[in-house]
Amino acid sequence: MHFLPFFDANFTPFHRLSWIILQSEIIKIYIKANCKMKTKLLFLMTLAVMLFTVSQAKKVHTLGDSTMAPYDESATVTRGWGMYFGNFLTNGWTSINYAKGGRDSRGGYTELWQTAKKHVEVGDYVIITFGHNDEKNSGMDGYELKAYYENIGETAKAAAVDLRGTVPSTTYKEWLGKIVDEAKEMGAIPIICSPVCRSYFTGSKIRRNGRHDLGDSFSVLTADGIKEKQSVPADDHTMDYAYHSQKLAEEKGVCFIDLTTATAELYESYGSQTKCEAQLFDGQGSTHFNTTGALLVARECARLMKAQGILADAIVLPTDLSVSPNTGDFGEAYKGQKLQKEFTLNGFGLTPEEGTVTITATDGIQLSLDKKEWEQSLTVDYTSSTLIKTFYAQLVLMQNGETNGTITVKQGDKQIDIPVTATAVVLTGGAEVTAYWRLEKDDSYELTGPAEVIPETFQGMYVQRYSNPNAKTEWPEWTGYDAARKMQRNLLTGDNWPADEIDDNPDRYIQWGLKPAAGTELKIDLISLFAAGCGGNGMCCHIYYSTDNFATRTTIFEMKKMPANNPQFVEAKPVLTVKDGQELLVRVYPWYNGAASGKTICLSDLTIHGMAVETTGIRQVSTENSHTTAFFTVDGRQHTQMQRGLNIVRMADGNIKKIIY
């Protein structure tokens, strides 16, 4: 195969773009079935293009569901394997994880890919893995099922349909294919990964539905209605999501990583479901990983990619002792605040086969293996030349400015020093802002300070009521509240919680928010509320905040199987700036552990606190001899004259000025 000549020095941007497109088309013609060959050809094309760009970032973008998603280590023990994939990249490559819990392939395209592709550049890799939530509705498509119920007049059933879910051979492949096609058009290199298994064992083997093949029991929507509890023979892959992801890769001419088979073999190596889940899972079921499980799956994905020649020179599989992350940047927090950070020891092929690793820290840093007992030094034993162990570091910011220290890991004559940094910030200046929702009898709020509240809204939820005479609410003792204190009780649309939910539903949440007044930005230092499940012990929820309309989000609370009538205090103290034009949104995403009706998620006492400070460009000026037509405070109230402080002034010529008086 011959490449076109390189760019001439006089090529215009149009000529260069034309060259890239033509070169890409030639590559497509010559791509064959062998994945190594495809990767090398795409790499050569990418290399040629990169020669004529000023700077080419090296990025791997990961799109997937909760098994891949990032989690806040201070809020949960659950981990997604996408959090650790970057540990196995070198030579300047970075991994960006866009995965979110509860997403199927449709949501992967309509939400996650729409965010990711804004940052995708020529030569980037895009790893795509969905399947867990595509199995909703027993293998039927959620939108098709809703349309069916609407057509036959079953409006209540239509409203209750979980819109997630696709058909393996049709809509599942269609949505994955859209991501693949658009990634290729952008000059990126898509890789399809089949979904990781669930630890559904029969004896010592992962059974069929654990491998995402619903062939033993599925539903199908036909012209004559819904047919339930259908089955096909074991060698029939009609309802096998992993199988169809591989077929799609073959049809699209892109590389395929069989994580379904790889994770089945990993799980089965432990001999039983009990042993497997004890080592690899988060203790909350058969789907989500702990740190060890997520790390091993990320390593397995990297190993399979390297074996196929995908990013082979950029993937490193350590066989010695290493620590992840290799720096301890705790970020910014407020003076006096306690900070924690998670680290993972990784060792493969260690010598001797049995030994001890010691971990020590400089003054001011404490270490723990369980977040309960804290010491300045730890000892970790290993056997069979292998070590995967999580430990935690903790420090309290006692002074303003930067705090530094070191964590040292030793095994034999090998020593790893991890630099530790944290910065204490002081929130001063500006006007104090507090937004407070009592949620006792309605959704009204109290606002003090210059800001604008975004009222409570519901998606797939509604308020059932505010009181329950039979409830015996047990508030934390420190609150001083008694059982008579009311909470807002919320139900999902249709009232019936589905049987198969293991994560939040992106179409079901309760939201509040706060945004800066014109000409200011908000420095947020507190978000807090109470949350409880009522009517049963199976309520689960995630609570997040976001400043980019949930393109990205930060977890502040996760709890599964919440004790009934037992409000949990949720508190986050972020160092967070909400700029002029942005919105701080807080969302609660509830789901229930098993089919149920009438169970409610109960909420109260939401508080958002911070300081409003003036943005740059605000001038203190006199309005003498200026023609003005109206004066407004920063929260939008009109006055007949200038008020002390920051004013928004409309001039006679129509211009708007920000003036301090």
Image (cartoon, helix red, strand yellow):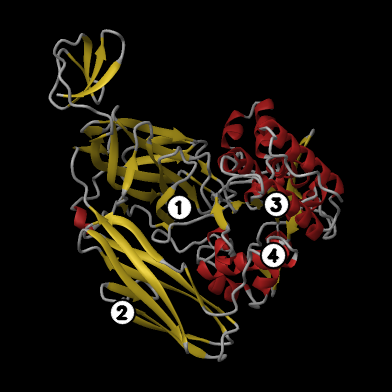
- Foreground mark, 3 or 2, reads 3
Instruction: Assign a secondary structure to mark 3.
Output: helix
Residue 192, compared with residue 408, is above or below; it is above
Q: CA distance from mark 1 to mark 2?
A: 36 Å
Which residue is farthest front? 9
Task: Give the residue drawn at x 54%, y 91%.
Answer: 354
Closer to the chain start, of discs 1 and 3, is 3
Residue annotated with mark 1: 540
Residue annotated with mark 2: 376
Residue annotated with mark 4: 312
Q: Nearer the viewer, residue 518 or 224?
A: 518
Instruction: Assign a secondary structure to mark 4.
Output: loop
Residue annotated with mark 3: 47
Q: CA distance from mark 3 to mark 2?
A: 49 Å
Circles 4 and 1 in contact, beta carbons < 8 Å: no
Q: CA distance from mark 4 to mark 1?
A: 41 Å
Amino acid of disc 4: Ala
Q: Residue 487 is drawn in which quadrant? A: top left
Q: Give the image location of residue 355, x and y in percent.
A: 50, 90
